[in-house]
Image (spheres, grey):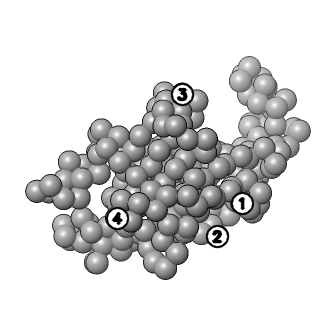
Amino acid sequence: MNYPEFFKSLELIKVQDPLSAILGAFEMGIYEFNYLDVVKSAGHSCPTVAGAYLITLEAIKALYPNGPAVRGEIKVEFKEELQEGVAGVISNVVSQITGATDKSGFKGLSGKFARHSLMNFSSNISSSARFTRVDSGKSVDVFYDPSPVAPSPSMNPLMQKIMGGLAEPKEIKEFGELWQERVKRIFENSSSVIRVVEL
């Protein structure tokens, strides 16, 4: 399996999942997500998927400064409707990492470990997403704007040729490389594209 080398260098997200500990999936329920994990699930790597990974990473670091996030105990809110724009793509990545879902998630064991109803859309917030610890009520708003990291000027004409069925194989390859180069720069400049506000 070949993929961009920079995937390997990106920061991991460590979680503790009490449900997985009880069910014997991971010792003490501790495991990690990396960017490659979410790319596999999304089927692609793009500024949106990168942004979803980054907002989750930075929210978790703010909410759990001294240890791993507790998966299944984080509520997530979005200002958009689920069907609006890229909200669905972002929420799928966030759900994968945090365990939070709207109505489709795990219903729990004897009233514990439920994952459904931890994700809400059309919320009255101004940020890209709001993350809240269920145990303490501590919340953070996370803002994501990739516009400071501009795409290569060559990308648009190449995309037009690809969409029109006129691109040569080398041009398709070049487009993919330029696309991932921007994703890499977004990660390298995360402080310019992500802002976390503690509430």
Q: Residues within 10 Å of mark 2 (few under 14, many from 20)?
A: few
Q: Nearer the viewer, residue 190 or 7?
A: 190
Decide which of tag 1 and tag 4 comes sooner along the chain.
4
How many numbered circles are shown? 4
Disc 2 versus disc 4: distance between alpha carbons? 32 Å
Give amino acid for label 3: Glu
Decide which of tag 2 and tag 1 comes sooner along the chain.
2
Label pair 4/3, CB-CB below 8 angstroms: no
Q: Nearer the viewer, mark 3 or mark 2?
A: 3
Residue 189 occupies which quadrant of the picture?
bottom right
Q: Nearer the viewer, mark 1 or mark 4?
A: 4
Q: Residues within 10 Å of mark 4 (few under 14, many from 20)?
A: few
Which disc is residue 135 wearing?
A: 4
Decide which of tag 4 and tag 3 comes sooner along the chain.
3
Decide which of tag 2 and tag 4 comes sooner along the chain.
2
Give amino acid for label 4: Asp
Residue located at (55% from left, 67% from top): 62
User: What residue is shown with label 1?
Assistant: 190
Give amino acid for label 1: Ser
Disc 2 versus disc 1: distance between alpha carbons? 14 Å
Q: Quadrant of the C terminus?
A: bottom right
Q: Nearer the viewer, residue 48 or 160?
A: 48
Decide which of tag 3 and tag 1 comes sooner along the chain.
3
Decide which of tag 3 and tag 2 comes sooner along the chain.
2
Taking 83 as reference, is 173 above or below it? Answer: below
User: What residue is shown with label 2?
Assistant: 9
Q: Nearer the viewer, mark 2 or mark 4?
A: 4
